[in-house]
Amino acid sequence: MQTRSALVLLSVLSFPILATAQSAPLEVRYGPEQTVFGSCKPSLTLVNKSNRPLDYVQVDIAYRLKDGSEKLAEHKSRYRTGVDNPVQPGEQRLLVIHHDESTPLGAACKDIVAARIQAAECNGSAASPCMVLAPRIGETLTLPTR
């Protein structure tokens, strides 16, 4: 009886956590990555699970490298002032670093040891933060096995 009660309590307590993780309308995953001129060019995969199109999405990632340094990179769904190309509901889109607007990481992909979401912005014209992003701002992304 105590075992059953413990299992029921555990499932009740864990349900809100699972529901929150599954209900986030915007999901970001690390990858794919490629090497361009000797420097890693990581990208993020955005999944729009919401019921509205997103005009513009930018997710800033703080990359920690093997040598202990940290590099900040802006991953964007498009150029901020570029041609409209909304991320439709149910659509997946790569968020990429535009190297003509930023500096390369200057490290190989295998040298990235952590990636933490520093900031996020949705709908560039309204400049609103992505409050319902999974993982949330401040959390780390799962990296591929190195």
Image (cartoon, rainbow, N blue to C red):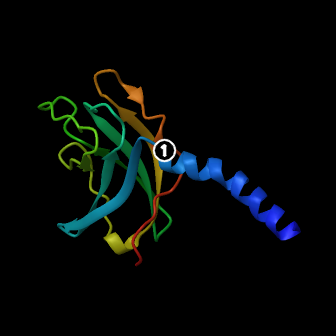
Q: Is residue 60 left or right of residue 3?
A: left
* x 25%, y 30%: residue: 55
Say which element carries label 1: helix
Residue closest to the far front? 1
Residue at left offset 32%, top offset 59% = 105
Image quadrant assignment for residue 112: bottom left
Kindly identify the amino acid type of the residue bearing the numbered disc 1: Ser
Q: Nearer the viewer, residue 13 or 42?
A: 13
Where does residue 62 sit, x and y in percent of width and height? 44, 52
Residue 44: % across, % down: 32, 54
Residue situated furthest left in the rendering? 83
Q: Nearer the viewer, residue 145 or 11?
A: 11
> Can the viewer see residue 131?
yes
65 relative to 88 in the view: left or right: right
* Along the line of sight, the residue nearer the viewer: 141 or 14: 14
Point out residue 113 in the picture as x, y percentages from the top left corner. 46, 68
Q: Is the residue 126 above or below the residue 36 in the image?
A: above
> If the image is split into quadrants, where does the C terminus sit?
bottom left
The quadrant where residue 11 appears:
bottom right
Q: Which residue is mark 1?
A: 23
Residue occupying image coordinates x 36% and y 59%: 30
Q: Alpha-carbon neighbours of circle 1 within 10 Å: few (<14), some, or many (≥20)? A: some
Residue at x 53%, y 50% (from the top left corner): 21
Towards the viewer: 134 or 83: 134
The image shows residue 69, relative to residue 128, as above or below, that is below
**Is 71 displayed left or right of 80 in the figure?**
right
